[in-house]
Amino acid sequence: MTLHRQAQELLESFASATGDGPPPERSVEEMRALSGGFRQMQGDAAVIGSTRVEKIPVSGGFVEATVYEPVRDAKGLVVYFHGGGFVLGAPRDFEVLYHALVAQSQVRLVAIDYRLAPEHPFPTGVDDSYAGLLWSAEHLANGLPIIVAGDSSGGTFAAVAARRARDHDGPALAAQVLVYPVTDHDFSRTSYDEHGDSGLLVGKSDMEWYWAQYASDPAVRDGEDASPLRAASFEGLPPAFVLVDEYDPVRDEAKAFADRLIDAKVPTVVDYVADQMHGYFTMANMMASADESIARVAAYIRSVVHH
């Protein structure tokens, strides 16, 4: 199946606006400026009950977390970690997605504003994320079922948080939602060969650059907190929803993660999207595929928290 027409149109408009795309000697500031433009294109967010900002204590200080409340009483708590290659993004950039999940799932969602690389390299982001889960479980769950969720590098953090919770007597999790998660640092997989240099939003050179900002020492990348696919055991992890898209350099590692969950007899839904690319999920109101996928994720969350 070919790449979705709306994705092709987005890539064409992006290319015309940026020339040949990010320069090889790209700076963090340039990349953050490029990534921040999508929120303006998404229009109005769905109506929810309220929004507030909390401060969460972490090693070395505090991070903020934005709490999105549904109109009616929440049936569950979703702790969400945004994507952005460990380097880009903040909860405000993804509020249309968060509003949609809250409105469609009737959950309380807390978006953790973890500290970003390269200013805060590995393991700061993953440690902040787990601290955010622990704080949220203590202060926001109130007995509700808890789900960890994330897209791209946020999927990395969600997967690690789920495993840490299992291994360190953390909160009991009802599920984990992983949207095209980055689970390894192996750039030799077939999906990197197929989609690493084909003009998509995220290519091989992008992923190499992100990893260089996040974990410049290759030796640390093999650890299970950096590359959750390399964890020794997947047994006893919470049920999972794993979205895998075709036009994506990380397609194969996301699929491999889902396969290991299934092999460990973890109840796992694999949502394969044959005509989309890495990054599309957060483009609510911009792409029909994004809205459809958000609806499927929301339906899965409902099935977990409304049982």
Image: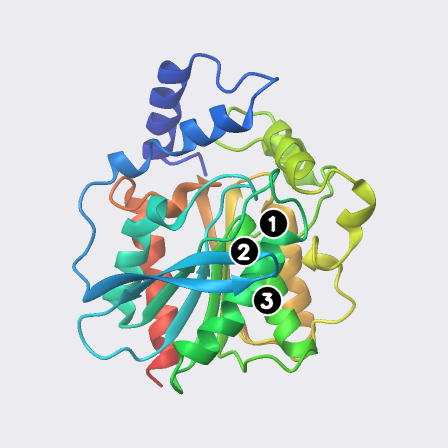
> Could you tell me if the residues under marks 3 and 1 are in contact, i.e. CB atoms within 8 Å?
no
Which badge, 3 or 1, is on the more N-terminal residue? 3
Instruction: Name the one closer to the observer, 136 or 289.
Output: 136
Going by the numbered disc 1, the residue's amino acid type is Val
Which residue is painted at 16% across and 59% down in the image? 47
Q: Amino acid at mark 2?
A: Gly
Disc 3 vs disc 1: which is toward the camera?
3
**Above or below for 241 versus 9:** below
In the rendered image, which residue does mark 2 sit on?
155
On screen, 280 above or below 179? Answer: above
Q: Position of residue 286 (x, y in %)?
A: 27, 39
Q: Is residue 204 visible?
A: yes
Residue 265, visible in the rendered structure? no
Going 41% across and 77% down the picture, which residue do you hit?
139
Q: For the C terminus, give its image quadrant.
A: bottom left
Q: Is residue 291 left or right of residue 36?
A: left
Residue bearing the label numbered 3? 161
Q: CA distance from mark 2 to mark 3?
A: 10 Å
Q: Which mark is residue 182?
A: 1
